[in-house]
Image (cartoon, grey):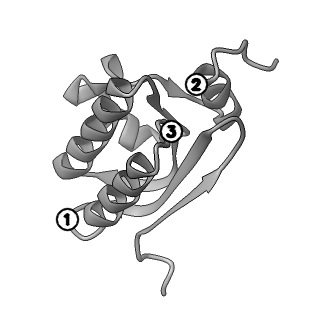
Amino acid sequence: MNDTAPVVWTAPLRDEVWSVGVRGRLDHNAVPQLESALRELAAAGHVRLMVDMELVSYINSGGLRVLISAWRAARREGGDLQLCRLNPRVNDIFRMAGFDQVFRIHDLPSDAVCALLNEPAVP
């Protein structure tokens, strides 16, 4: 795989919090990969999710839709989905779409994990 190909991966963190990492352009080619990963986590009962978007260079409406759907599903089951490390371009897209009012967006993954666990952020 080359460096421009989108990649989605998941990993357990702690206390039932799972990390979802994404790299590249989150567009019509990559959205199905993200949707599949998020559905697999939900099917396994993992509802506390941190999506690390540090390596995402772009997100389209399909990517936003998948994140909203996963956020709703997690909340329905008593969990949550939070985002971290959005680059300025992706952050602008979230702000223009009003999704910065829906998602909790964190600068650091550790802050997102603490929020998911209802713990104070580590200074």
Residue type, numbered disc 2: Leu
Residue type, numbered disc 1: His
Closer to the camera in the image, 81 or 121: 81
Closer to the camera in the image, 93 or 78: 78
Q: Which residue is mark 3?
A: 49
How many neighbours does mark 2 have within 10 angstroms: few (below 14), some (14-19), or many (20 or more)? Answer: many
Alpha carbon separation for disc pair 1 and 3:
22 Å
Closer to the camera in the image, 3 or 73: 73
Disc assigned to residue 116: 2
Say what secondary structure mark 1 lies in: loop
How many neighbours does mark 1 have within 10 angstroms: few (below 14), some (14-19), or many (20 or more)? Answer: few
Q: Which residue is mark 1?
A: 28
Image-based side of 14 in relation to 92, left or right: right
Lower position in the chain sequence, tag 3 or tag 2: 3
Residue type, numbered disc 3: Leu
The quadrant in which the C terminus is found is: top right
Quarter of the image where one finds residue 99: top left
- Determine the residue positioned at 48% across, 85% down: 2
- Determine the residue positioned at 55% across, 39% down: 85
